[in-house]
Amino acid sequence: MEQFRAFLRRKNIVFSAKRYGVDALGAMAQGLFCTLLVGTILNTLGTQFHIGFLSATVVTVGTGEAATAYTIGGLASAMVGPAMAVAIGSALQAPALVLFSLVPVGYATNILGGAGGPLAVLVIAIVAAECGKAVSKETKVDILVTPIVTVLVGIGVAYLVAPPIGTAASWVGNLIMWATELQPFFMGILVSVIVGIALTLPISSAAICAALGLTGLAGGAAVAGCCAQMVGFAVLSFRENRWGGLVSQGLGTSMLQMGNIVRNPRIWIPPTLASAITGPIATCLFRLEMNGTPVSSGMGTCGLVGPIGVYTGWVEDIAAGLRTSIGGMDWLGLVLICFVLPGVLTWLLGIPCRKAGWIKEGDLKLED
């Protein structure tokens, strides 16, 4: 057993919740962002602003009726599986041959996983990467052995388990979305608070939403929760961090406050309560839905991805004939839920917390 442990250490194979549940999951979200999300944004810009080079076909794959035309954004989105797998391999510190071999693994897994493809890629890319790392540089023909093992293990396992993993993830996501439609008030609170907390924790709320395919009314609640955390912390900590903190948290990530939360968990109370309020307002009053890409549901105001995702969903619904136009109430709900209410509510809720001594001067100060 000691020899096996020594082998794992030498190969940098670490079985831990942090490496798989934090590092790999966070990296997967970056892969999603750089492909699927960026592709969606580019397509939306090209369509809405009639930008020729963004809406023009640059590549056609196949011939005849089976031909598929891709724009720049379409190509970026099509590479989401490989990007996620390579990002995961990078987080696991995989050698170069393993990393490059994960490209076909990610592509195959994402397709086989269907709607739950991102979760399947997370699981199978980890398995393939660790197996590839185990054999890396163990033979004199490493340039053949390592890629072959990584690809065979990855695609072989994907063929067997990606469809059921995808089905299970899709089922859970559909259950959450069904429950939110059935009980928009209580599920609005639950989804908003949980996804918002996940956004601030050192895990990826975007990857979770993508893995579950969280869209619709539940996606809108998730957007509300994420925006409440990001905008909330940005406003709550303004006296300590000024404009730099407002931008870095409001358009970057509330995860910057994680160190301060560990030191004083009570600073988390105002933005979390704000998310519990904005969630049901989003689901019950404005019926705010995220019908863009699921990953947008867990991004909040990071790069304005959450609001852009909601807008993209509106555009797609109009194109599909599901709605006729974007009304004033839609825009009002988006602005209030994503920007105004998170800031105002968190600021108001922070006043009694400061007066009670739960939040002291400097508790929200970000490190320079």
Image (cartoon, grey):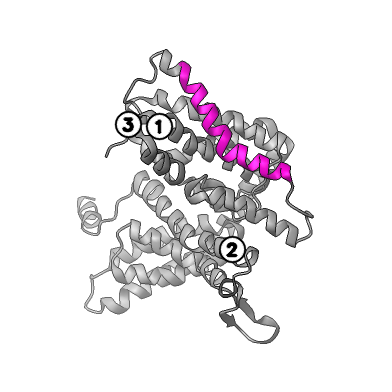
Residue 351 located within the stretch drawn in magenta: yes
Residue 220 circle label:
none
Residue 337 falls within the magenta-colored stretch: yes
Task: Give the camera-side residue of 96 and 292.
Answer: 292
Q: Amino acid at mark 3?
A: Lys
Q: Neighbour class for label 3 at 10 Å: few (<14), some, many (≥20)?
A: some
Specify whether 223 is left or right of 95.
right
User: Which mark lies nearer to you, 1 or 3?
Assistant: 1
Q: Which residue is mark 2?
A: 45
The residue tagged 3 is: 365
Q: Is residue 85 above or below residue 209?
A: below
Q: Which residues, given as a range, are shown in magenta?
A: 328-352
- Is residue 249 visible in the rendered structure shown here? yes
For marks 1 and 3, the one nearer the N-term is 1
Residue, disc 1:
238
Q: Tell me which residue sits at (74%, 62%) in the image.
A: 319
SS for tag 2? helix
Three-letter residue code for mark 1 = Phe
Estimate how packed mark 2 is, as few (under 14), some (14 to 19) or many (20 or more) residues with alpha carbons within 10 Å.
some
Marks 1 and 3, Cα distance to the nearest angstrom?
9 Å
